[in-house]
Image (spheres, grey):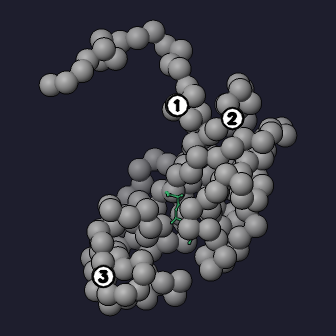
Amino acid sequence: MSLRQEIRKGEVAIDAPPATDAGLVFIGRIRTPWTSRLDCPRQGRRDGPTCRIELFEPWTPGLAGIEAFETLEVLYWLDRSRRDLVRQSPADDGSTRGVFALRSPVRPNPIGTSLVTLLGVEGATMLVRGLDCLDGTPLIDLKPDRCAFTPLAPPQPGDFQVGD
Ligand code: SAM
């Protein structure tokens, strides 16, 4: 899919069922330097520009402890994407791949994820590097990077299960 949202050679759009409310709530807004998809990085880079993640009330108490993590996983809603292309041609050369074999923003549920470097926290705003979304993109969730996170809750039997 191109920036103009037309269908490229070989791409397949389906008649997507109407979106239903999965109960998502946008908890903030992401401020980035990019207002056009033509300028946005395809994937964020950890040496990219500083971006701001603004958390809305009443969620700000949820930031307690976040400054201990250098890397955060950010989930966001790619709100300006179409959602109906099951085969896509990213290179616009006629060759296509299924949506679930791509990290394209065009997907049935346009969730984007990035690992970002946390530079600082200023009240309800986090300064980060590593994002690739348009200015104003809605924020879905923030989590500490799983590699740096040790569960605080006691272990459960499933934690020790291996194999079949
Ligand atoms: N890093 C995320 C991932 O892998 O899930 C997103 C990758 S996606 C390829 C990034 C691209 O999505 C950007 O280059 C831009 O073209 C597009 N994009 C960014 N913000 C968007 C938004 N709010 N709505 C629709 N498309 C967006």
Calculate the distance from the C-alpha at mark 2 to the C-alpha at mark 1.
Answer: 11 Å
Say if 86 sits above or below 44 in the image.
below
Say if 129 sits above or below 89 in the image.
above
| Residue 26 x %, y % | 59, 50
The residue at the far front in this view is 47
| Residue 41 x %, y % | 62, 68
Secondary structure of residue under mark 2: loop
| Residue 16 x %, y % | 30, 71
- Identify the residue at horizontal 53%, vertical 15% (top origin): 152
Say if 9 sits above or below 24 in the image.
below
- Tags 3 and 1 touching, CB below 8 Å: no
Calculate the distance from the C-alpha at mark 3 to the C-alpha at mark 2.
Answer: 39 Å
Location of residue 6 (image quadrant): bottom left
Q: Quadrant of the N terminus?
A: bottom left
In the image, 64: left or right of 100?
right
In the image, 65: left or right of 132?
right
Front residue of this view, candidates 10 and 13: 10
Name which residue type carries label 3: Ser
Q: Quadrant of the C terminus?
A: top left
Query: What numbered label is drawn on residue 95?
Result: 3
Which of disc 1 and disc 3 is earlier in sequence? 3
Query: What numbered label is drawn on residue 70?
Result: 2
| Residue 155 x %, y % | 40, 11
On the image, numbered disc 1 is attached to which residue? Answer: 147
Near mark 1 (Cα within 10 A), the count class, few <14, some 14-19 or many ≥20, is: few
Ligand 1 has an atom within 8 Å of the beta carbon of the residue at disc 1: no
Name which residue type carries label 2: Glu
In the image, 49: left or right of 88?
right
- Identify the residue at horizontal 70%, vertical 66% (top origin): 135
